[in-house]
Amino acid sequence: MGERIRGMGRRVAIGALLSSACSLEDALGVDGDGGGTTSGQTQGQTQSQTQGQTQAGPAGTAVDDTTMDGATEPADETATTADPEPTACEGRSLRVAGFNVESLGAQGSESFEALASVLARIDADIVCLEEVDFWDTATLFALANQAGYPDVIQANEPPAIGGDFTNACLSRSSLSMVGSYSGWDLSSDSEANDVGRDILVVRADLSGPGEPPCAVGVVSLHLKSGQEPIDWFRRQVEAERVVQAVALYRDAYPDDPMVIMGDLNESLDDPALGSTFTGLPEGLPPSYHMGADIELPLVYQPFDTFEGLGFSIAPATQEDSSRDQTWNDAVRLDYVLHADAQLQGALVYNACRDDGTDDPPAGQWLPLAGEPLDCSLSDLASDHFPVMADLVLP
């Protein structure tokens, strides 16, 4: 495999390409993090034929990937860019959604069509997906095309400790890759191998022609699954890496509001929160190596970790309900968190509760696109429900 540029995805044109574990699998005795091939080659990709997109690397280096005629030119690792213009979104509205899709399904299959229908119904400006197989890029682009998203970026293939799953973001506006971060991309320890699925960070340019600059940073993540102490430990280590990824973004784009979306594989009231690790737990994969920059003891508090960065959890519930369950209608695992943006409303989309009206009492409802979907489509699309939030940007 080719040498991997730290934290950088590869951007290619996809005109020619268009033609699971569940979140608690480990707890149920099915390992969704085993297997896979150690990543040494970038594969972050976009659907747009964009020239001169800038990627901010963890070492402070900016890399320009120029796409022409479907071919990606080698990146210049020494290139630098000027400081970005301050953003001024002036009250722009933005709908974002995170969705663990379990599987994209084969093109044309019931699950694929259901997934496309759900994406069209929730009508998000930016949606980030988890559990996209690293090799299923063509299906990902076909889904984006059918659901009306012209720009797509998929994270790098994960290391062996992460299995086959990647994160991916779809957008109606222009996306640029900031980083697809493994442990060694973010750590000062080059031997660090402590992030299962790469943390995907993208920047969405929301500016229209002649409008002042407006951009938002999006972090897409899927923390380690499972409900054993070893899983709590690995999730917290990954949360510490998210802190570093957010810091890199804010160094590059200090005026941008930000969103974190994804499957955190944890509920807000889990008694495991607060567990303290004074050493490495037994049973870590042979290739797992916690970077030397993370210090013990380590306290398991991923929500506190993200809130300490200034992010707030959107209090999403199912329509006309106080239910906040996102996985198999049994437990909440999926979240949208926002910083420097005002929350207007949030929703866990379950087609079985979708009647197109805000039933009394008012609230716990968002306007959606098109007509209500048949109840069966949520189960066909995934074992998770998408979580969406309407934001107003400064």
Image: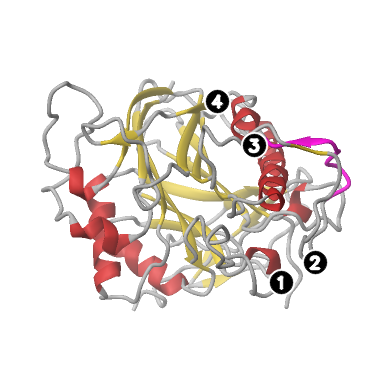
Distance Cα–Cα, label 3 vs label 4: 18 Å
Characterize the magenta stretch by its predominant secondary structure: loop
For marks 1 and 2, the one nearer the N-term is: 1
Q: In which quadrant will I find the N terminus?
A: bottom right
Alpha-carbon span between mark 2 and mark 4 = 42 Å
Task: Give the residue pinned by disc 4.
Answer: 86
Upstream in sequence: badge 3 or badge 4: 4
Residue 315 appears left or right of 367:
right
Of circles 1 and 3, which is in front? 1
Q: Which mark is residue 246?
A: 3
Q: Residue at x 66, y 51 (%)?
A: 231
Measured in 3D between alpha carbons, the distance from the residue under mark 1 to the one under mark 4, in whole angstroms, is: 39 Å
Element type at marker 2?
A: loop
Q: Where is residue 394? Give x, y as percent.
A: 44, 20
Camera-side residue: 76 or 286? 286
Q: Give the mark nearest the N terminus, 2 or 4.
A: 4
Q: Which comes sooner in the sequence, label 1 or label 3?
A: 1
Identify the residue shown where x is 35% and y is 27%: 92
Which circle's residue, 2 or 3, is located before the other in the chain? Answer: 3
Q: How far apart are the two marked residues, 1 and 3, measured between alpha carbons?
A: 25 Å
Disc 2 from disc 3: Cα separation? 26 Å
Q: Is 286 in the magenta?
A: no
* Mark 1 crowd level (few <14, some 14–19, many ≥20, 10 Å Cα): some
Residue 298 magenta-highlighted: yes
- Up the image or down, 242 lies above or below 83; here it is below
Colouring mode (rainbow / by chain / secondary structure / one colour): secondary structure
Mark 3 belongs to which amino acid? Val
The residue at which mark 2 appears reads as 287
- Percent position (x, y) of residue 293? 86, 42
Evaluate if marks 1 and 2 touch, with contact meaning CB atoms under 8 Å apart.
yes
Residue toward you, 107 or 334? 334
